[in-house]
Each structure stands twice: as C-alpha cells, then as structure tokens.
Image (cartoon, rainbow, N blue to C red):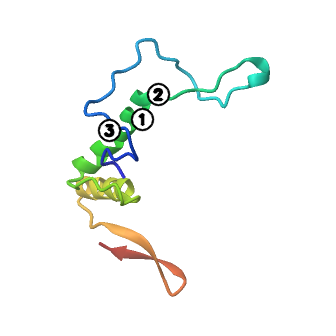
Amino acid sequence: MVDRVYERNASDSAPQPPADPSTGYPTAGNPAEGVPATQPGPYWYHMITESLRRVVVEAGMEPDHENLEQVLEAINQLAADRLGLTTHKLTVINGALAMEEI
C-alpha cells in the first residue's frame, strides 16, 4: 500500500511543500458561487504516503503496494511489540468472528 507506486508519471524526487499552503478543511467547491474545489497537490500525497510508509517500516515490514491491510497490520505489530503481547487478528470461522493468533 505504501511503496511509492503510482500508475504513471512518478518523479525521482520528493515534491517540495507548497510555499503558500491553504489550511482548513477540503471542499468540493461550488461553481455557482465561484468557490473552487480543494486541490491537494503532490506534496499532500507525498506527506500522506510517507507518513503511512513510516508506520510500516517502523514495524519492521517491507512496504508492499499490493497489501491494502499493511498499515493496520503494522499498527497492530507496533502495539503488540510495545505492550509485549502476542499479535492477533480478527477472522471469520464458521460464520462467527474469532481472534486468531498470528
């Protein structure tokens, strides 16, 4: 999920933060009132990706863009490591939720 993989047109270097960022909450805009939609921009995508990637790397995992549960797995691993617990995951067995040790 967090392996810096994009469909096309990726850059070799990280984008720079915007010089004059807009702060607040995103909006879909309102063309009738002349309110433009929020544009996240390349730095926003970079910021989110790198933050999530850091969670995965700190958990000792290799980022895998095909594993959409990797961030959750990493958070569970980090929590288990810090608490000294065995890691478990929720699973369905015979139509019922169950905790399964990993």
Q: Residue at x 70, y 20 (%)?
A: 35
| Element at label 1 | helix
Instruction: Give the image quarter of residue 25.
Output: top right
Q: Position of residue 40 (x, y in %)?
A: 50, 29
Q: Which residue is mark 3?
A: 50
Q: Position of residue 76 (x, y in %)?
A: 34, 58
**Residue 78 in the image: above or below residue 25:** below
Q: Which residue is mark 2?
A: 41
Q: Residue at x 26, y 30 (%)?
A: 13
Q: Earlier in the sequence, mark 3 or mark 2?
A: 2
Question: How much space separates mark 1 and mark 3, taking CA atoms?
Answer: 8 Å
Circles 2 and 1, Cβ within 8 Å, touching? The answer is: yes
Toward the front, the furthest residue is: 9
Mark 2 residue type? Gly
Left or right, residue 17 beside residue 40: left
Q: Which residue is mark 1?
A: 45
Instruction: Give the image quarter of residue 90.
Output: bottom left
| Element at label 2 | helix
Judge the density around disc 2: few (<14), some (14-19), many (≥20) Cα neighbours within 10 Å. Answer: few
Q: Residue at x 28, y 50 (%)?
A: 56
Q: Nearer the viewer, residue 12 or 90?
A: 12
Residue 82 numbered tag: none
